[in-house]
Image (cartoon, rainbow, N blue to C red):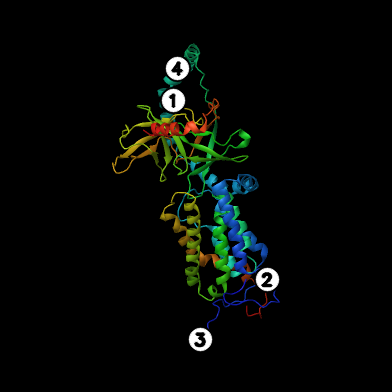
């Protein structure tokens, strides 16, 4: 009886494509809020993107990641391709590890996501440092830690529409 | 997407393998990176995409602008009165200079005409407001609320009430991007106001500027004011740029390490003035390349001193 099982004790409804698109666009909007060089602000697009690439690897993949990366490059006024490269690698890691990560409880899932987000930041750092930019300071990396800490609430928020039963019935167990 | 170590059965159509897809998109991103960083050929694409994204950006700015507006609304009356009094006394203090400037400019024009010198271009500019600082943590840039429609062009100098803050680097239809003096890639030719020593100042990150390629025994002191030299044809000469804050003369290096602090409120937000483009007289014809080589070396050395 020691077989591992998915922690979720509910059977989820299928995710809707429009909901995924709306959440990604909302994340993009949040990223475009001009907060300047404030540290601790997570990269919302990276976080939502890795969430969907882990939960819905068939619907959100590297193509979506590339598109939103280019959108971030334009919105951020950074170098073209910088976010795109990092997000594509992030989506690749997310899709490849999705079957593994979902077996873990949420806290350990966040521990998986943290190195991926840090890796994406390192890719961006390498791309810009080769281009001769200045080092943004170690405080910049805190945004990944904040994003990983948000994994738990984000999971509940983004899976909320899938928890809903199709029709209410007193005799249904779920 | 396949699970690591397992390939899906061939009857499920899933497109190219993940690794092939990764290679494709990563290569595309790297091509874009190189094209933008090395060849700067993607400005048109950025212009088109930024124009499409402009409404979205305005929506994203609303909460921050709203918060700032509310903050201003609740600013206490006393604070506004104090500020008003301070501004009044400052305008009185500068009134003397301002009132005499018209007279001095006329006199200057007459004298220049007498001396048969070319007239200096009068400075004209457009007031713009800094919307926000770009989120990109690797550079120091701000966005202002005037763009192509207001006649802003790339390369124009941007000043505030104290001195130079930077230069317009990208222009969108309704916005423009200003690279601040403290950006690592931003260089500005300057002159020491006290003795006329010429140098190039470049951003050093962390809100400071450094003077590059000045010899260890160059005649410069802490506290010296640096003003634009105007040699580049972009900045009008004589605009205050920075104050020398720290000099490190180490004889084991050829050049002194000179750190300066910008005079203008480079990292602060507010209103700025975008100066019109300068009309530069055409450069004289260069001598033939073979004769030019040794002369060029000497000239560079002299400029470095």
> How dense is the environment of label 4, judged by Cα within 10 Å: few (below 14), some, or many (20 and up)?
few
The residue wearing badge 4 is B100
What is the CA distance from the residue labelled 2 to the residue labelled 3?
A: 34 Å
Q: Within the image, what quadrant is residue A46 found in?
A: bottom right
Query: Mark 4, mark 2: which one is toward the viewer?
Result: 2
Q: Position of residue B219 (x, y in %)?
A: 32, 31
Find numbered disc 3 in the image and state the secondary structure of the residue it sits on: loop
Q: Earlier in the sequence, mark 4 or mark 2?
A: 2
Residue B83 found in image quarter = top left
The answer to whether marks 4 and 2 mark residues whose Cβ atoms lie closer than 8 Å is: no
Q: Secondary structure at mark 4?
A: helix
Q: Nearer the viewer, mark 2 or mark 3?
A: 2
Mark 1 and mark 4 lie on one chain; the one further toward the N terminus is: 1
State the quadrant of the C terminus of chain B. top left
Label 1 vs label 4: CA separation?
Answer: 14 Å
Q: Are marks 3 and 1 in contact (CB under 8 Å)?
A: no
Mark 1 secondary-structure assignment: helix
| Callout 4–callout 3 Cβ contact below 8 Å | no
Q: Residues within 10 Å of mark 1 (few under 14, many from 20)?
A: few
Distance between mark 2 and mark 1 Cα atoms: 71 Å
Q: Of the residues tagged 2 and 1, which is closer to the observer?
A: 2
The disc at residue B91 is 1
In the picture, the disc for residue A2 is: 3
Residue B132 appears at what percent x and percent y?
52, 44
């Amino acid at each position: 009886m020691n077989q591992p099982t998915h922690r979720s004790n509910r059977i989820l409804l299928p995710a809707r494509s429009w909901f995924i698109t709306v959440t990604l666009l909302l994340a993009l909007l949040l990223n475009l809020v001009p907060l300047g060089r404030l540290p601790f602000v997570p990269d919302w697009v990276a976080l939502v993107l890795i969430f969907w690439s882990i939960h819905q690897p068939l619907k959100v993949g590297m193509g979506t990641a590339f598109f939103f990366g280019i959108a971030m490059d334009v919105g951020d006024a950074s170098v073209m391709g910088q976010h795109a490269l990092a997000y594509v690698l992030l989506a690749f890691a997310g899709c490849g590890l999705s079957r593994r990560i979902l077996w873990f409880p949420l806290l350990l899932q966040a521990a998986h996501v943290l190195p991926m987000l840090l890796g994406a930041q390192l890719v961006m750092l390498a791309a810009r440092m080769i281009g001769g930019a200045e080092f943004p300071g170690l405080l910049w990396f805190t945004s990944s830690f904040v994003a990983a800490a948000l994994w738990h609430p984000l999971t509940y928020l983004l899976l909320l529409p899938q928890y809903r039963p199709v029709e209410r019935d007193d005799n249904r167990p779920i | 997407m396949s699970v690591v170590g397992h390939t899906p059965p061939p009857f499920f159509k899933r497109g190219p393998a993940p690794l092939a897809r990764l290679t494709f998109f990563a290569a595309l991103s790297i091509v874009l990176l190189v094209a933008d960083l090395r060849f700067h050929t993607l400005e048109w694409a950025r212009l088109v995409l930024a124009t499409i994204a402009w409404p979205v950006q305005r929506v994203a700015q609303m909460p921050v602008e709203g918060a700032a507006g509310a903050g201003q609304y609740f600013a206490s009356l006393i604070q506004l009165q104090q500020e008003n009094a301070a501004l009044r006394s400052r305008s009185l203090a500068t009134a003397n200079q301002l009132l005499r400037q018209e007279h001095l400019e006329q006199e200057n024009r007459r004298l220049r005409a007498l001396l048969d010198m070319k007239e200096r271009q009068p400075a004209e500019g457009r007031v713009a407001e800094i919307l926000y600082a770009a989120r990109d943590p690797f550079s120091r840039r701000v966005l202002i609320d005037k763009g192509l429609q207001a006649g802003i062009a790339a390369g124009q100098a941007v000043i505030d009430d104290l001195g130079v803050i930077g230069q317009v680097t990208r222009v969108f239809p309704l916005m423009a991007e200003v690279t601040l003096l403290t950006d690592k890639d931003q260089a500005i030719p300057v002159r020491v106001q006290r003795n006329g020593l010429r140098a190039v100042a470049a951003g050093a990150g962390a809100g400071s500027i450094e003077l590059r390629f000045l010899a260890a025994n160059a005649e410069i002191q802490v506290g010296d004011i640096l003003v634009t030299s105007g040699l580049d044809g972009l900045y009008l000469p004589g605009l205050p740029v920075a104050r020398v804050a720290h000099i490190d003369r180490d004889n084991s290096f050829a050049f002194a390490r000179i750190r300066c602090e910008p005079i203008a409120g480079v990292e602060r937000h507010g209103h700025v003035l975008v100066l019109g483009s300068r009309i530069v007289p055409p450069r004289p014809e260069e001598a033939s390349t073979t004769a030019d080589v040794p002369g060029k070396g000497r000239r560079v050395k002299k400029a470095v001193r």
